[in-house]
Image: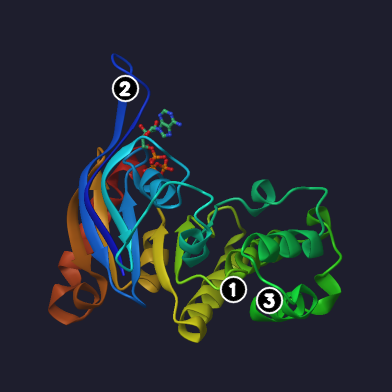
């Protein structure tokens, strides 16, 4: 469903140009959960942001269901199918917008009607009762805010969720709740995930396959399940330790 070929992404102009992603290629099947890991600055978030249409300076092929990413945020039909969840739910929610306002706006943007009926359903999908509908971000815990951010992403009934470190800003006890929610939502809604995380236990738990990035390049793609099972255990551990080396050094 997602195909990336010869993807280059850069920032700035020579001589200060940063080549953040170089010649990246991978494909993610419908319903699959695919992880991007690698040291800090290796280009993981940049790939997600390019797919989400948040960066213009890229070349190559990005296709979702055979449809090329236009980069034009007004291309509603495309951006309805692709949504992003960011690391910090506090930063991604406007402090003066209630949960009701956030979800109404997202539903309207996606051309949805019947907003009054859809909001309680979205809240229920992410495990929040109707009592949360008229709260503001400061009246929510970190985990509840991330649930609202996920509900906002679900508003347009997307097929592909881009998850950029979706639990790393949360307390350890809350991380597991959000990961379980994401696992359930993937099954219930038939979602496809492309997830960036520096936490290898998260990637190991959530992803079917993962790509290791180094200096803007994808250096290896691994099948997490195959590696996790039996004889490949040592490989799995070795690969994951290598993938996290940048973080351990940093
Ligand atoms: N807006 C920008 N302008 C200039 N350079 C940028 C910009 N955004 C990212 N970069 C650079 O692009 C490279 C890749 O950044 P990116 O955020 O994708 O890395 P990452 O692997 O997600 O890192 P982290 O795990 O620390 O978030 C880095 O060298 C970064 O400094």
Number of marks in picture: 3
Q: Say whether disc 3 or disc 2 marks the residue closer to the N-terminus.
A: 2
Check whether the beta carbons of the residues at disc 1 and disc 2 lie within 8 A of each other. Answer: no
**Quadrant position of ligand 1:** top left
Residue at disc 1, secondary structure: helix
- Is 227 drawn above or below residue 97 in the view shown? below
Instruction: Examine the image and state in which quarter residue 205 appears.
Output: bottom left
Where does label 1 land, which residue? 177
Q: Is residue 126 left or right of residue 186?
A: right
Which of the pair 68/40 is nearer the observer? 68
Percent x, y of residue 104: 75, 64
Q: Earlier in the sequence, mark 1 or mark 3?
A: 3
| Residue for point 70% across, 60% down | 145
Identify the image quadrant of the N terminus.
bottom left
Badge 3 element: helix
Q: Can the viewer see residue 36? A: yes
Residue 133 in the image: above or below residue 137 = below
Seen in the picture, residue 146 relative to 86 is either above or below; the reply is below
Residue underneath mark 2:
17
Are the residues flagged by discs 3 and 2 in contact, CB closer than 8 Å? no
Please tell me which residue lies in front, 76 or 140.
Answer: 76
Residue 20: image location, x then y, percent: 31, 35
Please give the residue where the numbered disc 3 appears in the rendered image: 122
Q: Residue 95 has which mark?
A: none
């Amino acid at each position: 469903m997602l195909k990336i070929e010869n993807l280059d992404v850069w920032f700035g102009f020579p001589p200060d140009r940063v080549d953040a992603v170089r010649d990246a290629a991978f494909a993610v099947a419908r319903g699959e959960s695919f992880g991007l890991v690698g040291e800090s600055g290796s280009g993981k978030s940049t790939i997600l942001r390019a797919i989400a249409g948040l960066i213009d300076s890229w070349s190559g092929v990005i296709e979702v269901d055979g449809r090329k990413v236009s980069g034009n945020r007004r291309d509603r039909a495309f951006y309805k199918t692709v949504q992003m969840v960011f690391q910090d739910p506090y930063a991604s929610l406007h402090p003066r917008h209630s949960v009701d306002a956030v979800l109404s706006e997202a539903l309207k943007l996606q051309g949805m009607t019947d907003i009054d009926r859809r909001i309680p359903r979205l809240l229920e999908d992410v495990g929040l009762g109707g009592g949360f509908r008229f709260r503001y971000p400061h009246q929510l815990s970190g985990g509840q805010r991330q649930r609202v951010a996920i509900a906002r992403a679900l508003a347009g009934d997307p097929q592909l969720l881009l998850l950029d470190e979706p639990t790393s800003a949360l307390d350890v006890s809350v991380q597991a709740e959000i990961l379980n929610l994401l696992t359930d939502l993937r099954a219930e809604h038939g979602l496809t995930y492309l997830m960036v995380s520096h936490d290898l236990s998260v990637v190991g738990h959530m992803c079917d396959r993962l790509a290791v990035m180094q200096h803007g390049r994808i250096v290896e793609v691994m099948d997490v399940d195959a590696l996790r099972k039996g004889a490949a255990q040592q490989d799995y551990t070795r690969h994951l330790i290598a993938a996290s080396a940048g973080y351990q050094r940093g």
